[in-house]
Image (cartoon, rainbow, N blue to C red):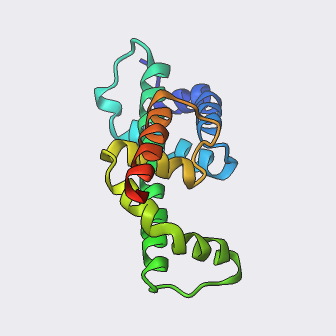
Amino acid sequence: MIDFDTLYTRYHPSIYAFLLQRTRSHELAEDLTQETFLKAWVAWERATDTNLKNWLLLIARRTSIDAGLKRARQDAASLDALCAGGMDVEDGQADIAERCAMGDVRRRALQRLPAHYRAELLKCASGWNKGAQNNELSRARQLFRKAMKEVSA
């Protein structure tokens, strides 16, 4: 089995490129790349020699998903705090404040969706991989439109 330094040198560019494609942010991709290799270092004893690149890509994928969900939860909490009056509205947040006026209907519609669909919509709304057009996101949008009609009626 190769040593960890060789693994890092050999696969860092591939892992970084994969994460850059998922996040579309150089800074976030670099942070997630470092986190991926940190997790790989911790799990190095359990690694096998069969396909280390796929093993690293799996860790990177899971790390990026976790980061996206964490960011979506933080964005949702910030929006909730702003709508509840817990945050001051600054110049850059004026559009968020305007959305809060209509946010109650949207919030009720979102609450009707299963958690994994809410997460997909929140990831998309928070800018997490805007280019992703996957089945989960499409289904989440479809269910959200239906819920909006039901709540508005």
For residue 66, above or below residue 70:
above
98 up-or-down from 114: above or below: below
Instruction: Examine the image and state in which quarter residue 91 appears.
Output: bottom right
Residue at far front of view: 153
Residue plotted at (52% across, 73% down): 100
Residue 50 seen anywhere in this rendered image of the structure:
yes
Residue 38 in view here? no
Q: How many marks?
A: 0
Quadrant location of the N terminus in the rendered image = top left
Residue 30's x, y, as percent? 61, 46
Measured from the top left, where is residue 58 in percent x and y? 43, 28
Question: Foreground: 86 or 25?
Answer: 86
Which quadrant would residue 84 be assigned to in this image?
Answer: bottom left
Classify 38 as above or below 93.
Answer: above
Residue 53, given in percent of the width and then of the height, sits at: 50, 21
Q: Is residue 46 left or right of residue 86?
A: left
Left-right relation of 79 to 108: right
Q: Position of residue 12 (x, y in %)?
A: 60, 33
Closer to the camera in the image, 114 or 69: 114
> What's the residue at 58%, 31% (across, down)?
133
Q: Nearer the viewer, residue 134 or 31?
A: 134
Considering the image in quadrants, where does the C terminus appear?
A: bottom left
* Along the viewing direction, whichever of 90 and 153 lies nearer the viewer: 153
Q: As displayed, is residue 44 above or below residue 39?
A: above
Image quarter for residue 17?
top right
